Image (cartoon, grey):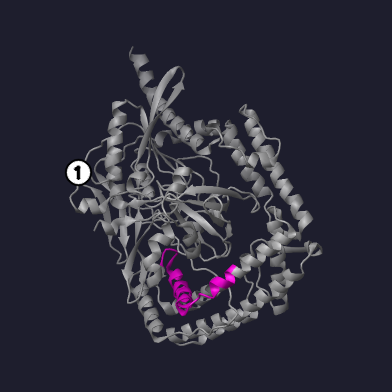
Amino acid sequence: MLKKLLISGFFFYSLLAIGDQRDTEVFKINENQILLAEEIINKLETSHLVKKDYISLKIEAFEEFLKRLDPNKTVFTSKEIKEFVTKNTSSKNIENDLEVAFEVFNKYVKRYEMRYEEQIDFLNILDSENLNSGRKLNRDLSESERLTSLEELKSLWIDLSTNDVIQLMLSGNSLDEAIEKTKKRMANQLNYFEQTRNEDVFNIFVNSIASMYGPHTTYMSPKNSEDFDINMSLSLEGIGALLSSDGLYTTISSLIPGGPADKGALLKPEDKIIGVGQDDMGEIVDVVGWRIDDVVDLIRGPKGSKVRLEIIPSTSISDNDTKEVEIIRNVVKLEDQAAEKKIISLERDEKSYKVGVIELPAFYFDFDAFQKRDYEYKSASKDVKRLLKELKEENVDGLVVDLRNNGGGSLYEANRLAQLFIGRGTIVQVKSSNGNIQGLGERWGYQYFDKPLVVLVNKFSASASEILAGAIQDYDRGLVVGTSTFGKGTVQKVDLLSSGQIKFTESKFYRVSGSSTQNLGVQPDINLPSLFELDDIGESSLKRALAHDTIPKTNHKNFKRVSGFIESLRQRSNNRVENSVLFDSVEARKQWQRDNEISLLDLNLELRLKQKNKIESFLLSNENALRDSLNLPTFSTYEEFVEREEDPEVLDLDSEVLGEAANILIDLIEIKEKPLMAQLKRTG
């Protein structure tokens, strides 16, 4: 039962658009694949939380298959797409649907081969004159209209190659170097396509069907099932990161708590990996357009060895703003994820306060040790209870529980942790695929920690983090501050198939208030600044994410600790945020990016250089203005700024946000003390 309750905060599995091959192979379905497809569809129709018949979604699923093959609309014309859909619509069963899909893929192979040859021919004659055109290219081709003719496609292929060369030149390459790197990138994609098998085509098709049920429903072939944990988490002698891909870039989805990347603080969620190098001298291999499993193979390596990653930071305004980071590979151990405590000392009106802080990176639980009756088993709730005991002995005035970037873990642990602050009572409601609703919590228990409480969250707080934060908020036991959370309110189950595995959503979480955490997440009582544009991140940004809904609320205690003070607390916090030079600098950067958003790329090197200089000039002036206000040394050039050594803590937004959470806690303590002080004065 406990294993079934293990939940994950971030999980992405992406099938990728792939390259081409010279010796065209004809891909064909086989009888086993037909039977397996029927098995997968039957499992989804009968067991998934969302009840959908394949017939009702087959056209949309086939259109998704076409999008996965040609996400940027650079291979097929609009007329061809209509013809493919019409042929799929007229097919009678899953066998016919598979035949149409494989037929489309074989046409895709030939067209992609044509594209490769056209682009290579162009690169062979490209010179500086080709980089001074007045043409423009949509930055996001997936949002553009599909082209109507082959001639228009050929023109687009030339524009794409031109842009690739310009992009590389803006990153410091000469024209010849940029051309050769572009050719090499294309050759790599071609090489990986030559390894494509019938199984890969089948996987793309059945996962297009699976995606109709939601972003966390996936078929994994035997090979993918075997490699899944290693490939997606890099937990075995890797860097400790969850990766995803959009077919072009491999992106950091989240960092594994306690892993090398997390400890080094060099990578952040939403960073894009564009190159991988080994040790100190190994060549940086360009991995743009690579399959995710091949990128993982490059990143993974022996414990103690070094990997160098070239990345586009998540906070970059331009894709030209790249940097190289070095990480020493290691094994992620359970003890590396352990909760930690510290104390923040604050002065207010000549009065000293001690704010306890517990950083909880994951809801970890050593199930194997627990099963073996090892009473020293590691668990988040055990560790937090021990830390709370120590903080009480140090007589802290209140507590901040820091759940930022906590992607989830054990539901059992989320329940145990909530009990420490709430005592007995339902913590979360779970609705299964058969419609049954079960409340999870403790019938007996007591509050282990009763002092004022703030829960700090961000957009990467998910699943179990949302359950704990939601319970604290619904019980009115403490304040939730930060940003809205990720919004993953579903539980997935993995079932074995005759070949491979299927992961599907089997149940959904609801707060005691009856509101689902799905999509909406937990909304903070007090919002704090973030480096990210939140609309682009989270469950609601995923295609076909399940909707937010509600069920009847369940009886629960009302502690009446904070709800009556929220407006006053919010005003105090807003005043501090508005007067914070660091928060102001972050907001200025985000606003500048909104005001200067680029939708069309000039295929003109001179114009792109001006654009690059404009971005760098803003970033330098914004940074120098911040540093000057804090009496820190400024930079004379953008290069000096990029190559700076580690910044002081006063420039760390994470530390600033934690400090503001501590200040909000003190505000709460002071506001609640005022009526008591007034009463004491009257009676005195």
Taking 336 as reference, is 83 above or below it? below
Screen quadrant of the N terminus: bottom left
Residue 576, image x, y percentages: 54, 30
Q: Secondary structure at mark 1?
A: loop
**Residue at 28% in and 46% down:** 379
Taking 489 as reference, is 146 above or below it? below
Residue 530, image x, y percentages: 53, 43
Say whether residue 180 is visible.
Answer: yes
| Residue 216 falls inside the magenta stretch | yes
Magenta portion: prevailing SS class: helix
Residue 569, image x, y percentages: 46, 32
Screen quadrant of the C terminus: top left
**Dot 1 corresponds to which residue?**
444
**Residue at 54% in and 83% down:** 25
Locate residue 181: give its quadrant: bottom right
Residue 325, image x, y percentages: 54, 48
- Of all residues, the one furthest to the front in this rendering is 281
Label 1 neighbour load within 10 Å: few <14, some 14-19, many 20+? few
Taking 18 as reference, is 657 above or below it? above
Going by the numbered disc 1, the residue's amino acid type is Trp
Locate residue 223: give its quadrant: bottom left
The stretch of residues the image draws in magenta is: 188-217
Q: Which residue is at the front of the view, 458 or 636?
A: 636
| Residue 286 falls inside the magenta stretch | no
Tell me: 180 left or right of 195.
Answer: right
Q: Which residue is at the front of the view, 608 or 81?
A: 608
Tell me: 496 left or right of 94.
Answer: left
**Residue at 20% in and 54% down:** 371
Q: Which residue is at the front of the view, 614 or 586?
A: 614
Taking 398 as reference, is 259 above or below it? below
